[in-house]
Image (cartoon, rainbow, N blue to C red):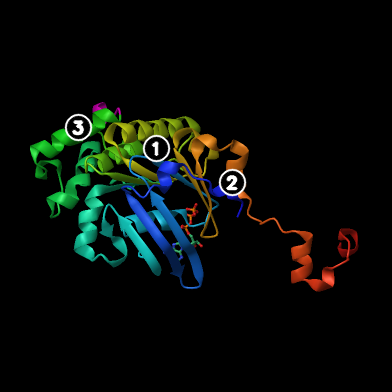
Amino acid sequence: MAQSMMATDASFTSSEERSIQLRNVTKQFGEVTALNDINIDFAPQKINVLLGLSGSGKSTLLRHINGLHKPTSGEVVTLGTEVHRAGARKLRMLRREVGMIFQHFHLVESMSVLENVCTGKLGSLGGPRLGLFMYPKEVKEQAMEQLARVGLADKAFNRADALSGGQMQRVAIARALIQEPKVLLADEPVAALDPVSSATVMNLIGKIAKEDNLTVVCSLHQVELALEFSDRIIGLRGGELVMDRDASTLSLKEAHEIYSAVAVVTDEEIEQQVPELAGITTEQQS
Ligand SMILES: Nc1ncnc2c1ncn2[C@@H]1O[C@H](COP(=O)(O)OP(=O)(O)OP(=O)(O)O)[C@@H](O)[C@H]1O
């Protein structure tokens, strides 16, 4: 792997406090190796973006951070919790501190916007609740505060399915924030949005991350957005870590190299692997 693709900001390699650590993490789904021996730390209060082709392992990596997946081998420690060996109770506790937003928002469309935000508190309130009246007054007030932060206080009593995609994602952000998380995981949060809404949502994530000192790990497909909104770019290809760079030092062209699906192979390597091709010109082969 090219050295330049793996250069890191000193703050990321510091042995000081780390929000998230993955050590030799491999994840197999049957025959498929979704992650292959990944070693990475995420420092607190940074915005980290995962880039890579479809199937490169971005969602799988995100899901290891809050224990939605457990590694086949290796260790994951998030906010001090050993995710790889945590039982259901410990994972529930951890997930109160780790908010997550998704490409398709995962709102309950028939519920009001306000109630959707209140559901972010279910993990700590316990028990099923159906209807706004079942939430304590202070939870509803907190939900209104978070809606105001994402610019949607005036939509609180609308049904969620009356909103645009960008607005739905902002509601999902408010729902994650009401948990008062330390870590925010975002799995392709703008993949279903138009460019203007995408920029609005990424701006919002960046602003809130700074205000709330959040550690953000976000998968994206838009390289330009990744460079604009992140502190750090992590590239995955076929489950392997192929880039780890401070975003401010990375050019657009370099970032696009993460997407070069075919590894560069030299003539010598081809001759070693396929001796019968040695000496045959491209013209003769075709
Ligand atoms: N639950 C699962 N069961 C079986 N295979 C899975 C599962 N989840 C992921 N995979 C496989 O693991 C590999 C990595 O998938 P993953 O969803 O992490 O990629 P991704 O980079 O997030 O892709 P995309 O950009 O399309 O979301 C793929 O080959 C995928 O098919």
The kind of secondary structure the magenta stretch mainly shows is: helix
The residue beneath circle 2 is 4
Quadrant of the image occupied by residue 275: bottom right
Q: Secondary structure at mark 2?
A: helix
Q: Residues within 10 Å of mark 2 (few under 14, many from 20)?
A: few
The residue beneath circle 3 is 144
Which-is-in-front pick, marks 1 and 3?
3
Looking at the rendering, the stretch of residues picked out in magenta corresponds to 151-155
Q: Does the residue tagged 2 have its C-beta within 8 Å of any atom of ligand 1?
A: no
| Residue 142 higher or lower than 2, as above or below | above
Cα distance, mark 3 to mark 2? Answer: 46 Å
Q: Position of residue 58 (x, y in %)?
A: 46, 53
| Residue 6 higher or lower than 207, as above or below | below
Whether 154 is among the magenta residues is yes
Amino acid type for the residue under numbered disc 1: Gly
The residue beneath circle 1 is 165
Choose between 67 and 82: the one closer to the eye.
82
Quadrant of the image occupied by residue 193: top left
Identity of the residue drawn at 46% across and 73% down: 30
Amino acid type for the residue under numbered disc 2: Ser
Amino acid type for the residue under numbered disc 3: Met
Cα distance, mark 1 to mark 3? Answer: 20 Å
Identity of the residue drawn at 25% across and 33% down: 158
Is tag 1's residue or tag 2's residue first in the polypeptide sequence?
2
Can residue 65 be seen in the rendering of this structure?
A: yes
Q: Secondary structure at mark 1?
A: helix
Q: Position of residue 4 (x, y in %)?
A: 59, 46
* Quadrant of the drawing holding the N terminus: bottom right
